[in-house]
Amino acid sequence: MEKSFSIEKPAGSKESHYHEGILRIINDLEKRVRAIEPNAVLHKELHEKRRMDARAEVKEFEEVRKDVCESFGVPYDEEHVYLQSNFGIKEQRALRAFFVLIDAISKEAFYGEGRTDHIALYTKLCDRLAEIDPHVNFETVSQDETGRYITFKGFVSTKEFAELSESNRRVLETPIIDEKNQKIETPKTWFVTGHNLPEGDKTEISS
């Protein structure tokens, strides 16, 4: 039986229309790449370092993390979820990043999170995928042109991004557009800054 990402809501889960919208797109995908060039102020906000205890926030971010995983069909277990082990009280990036990697053929999906660069999370998730498919590595995934590997990157927050100015959030955010040319609105605790979903012929986002 062909594996697919379920869009059925678990029993007792809260209403979350964005889960269904995102998973519907993932189940019917081609390829798209979007990139941004951050300005100086944006770069400062993204790379500013603050002292914090990463051990405490692993638990603090759990509900946000589970929501992102549910949105993209990532199993919430140690095999599919990678958390950067920057434990201890130390200077770390102010914004906590996440990365999602999906194999559209095998339907395997992985989630990475930490106060680090997206590329570092991407590399770790490719390693996780390689444990299942030994023919896969970072180069084969990142250089793939068939659309097999779907990627999403973004940021998570437990404070509705009070640490990020609204103007820079708008610059950073890469919308996920559904089949009706509507932007899928994610909650205030996370947003996507880049993905490789197909853009198609859409030229504007409906309000």
Image (cartoon, rainbow, N blue to C red):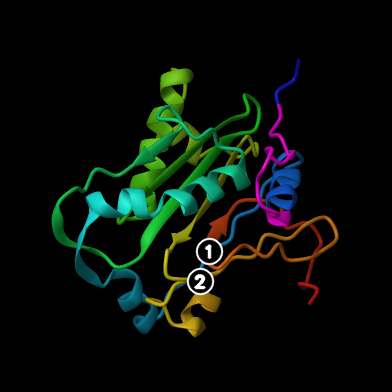
Task: Name the residue carrying label 1.
Answer: 35
* Alpha-carbon span between mark 2 and mark 1: 9 Å
Observer-nearest of 128 and 86: 86
Task: Tell me residue 172's x, y (percent).
Answer: 50, 71
Q: Which residues are magenta?
A: 4-18
Observer-nearest of 92 and 143: 92
Task: Name the residue carrying label 2.
Answer: 172
Question: In the figure, 108 relative to 171: above or below?
Answer: above
Is residue 170 left or right of 156 when viewed as pictured? right
Q: Residue at x 40, y 30 (%)?
A: 78
Task: Say few, some or many: other residues with alpha carbon within 10 Å of mark 1 (under 14 / 14 to 19 / 20 or more).
Answer: few
Is label 2 or label 1 in front? 2
**Is 165 within the magenta?**
no
Task: Tell me residue 62's x, y (percent).
Answer: 42, 48
Question: In the figure, 154 relative to 171: above or below?
Answer: above
Q: Is residue 178 visible?
A: yes
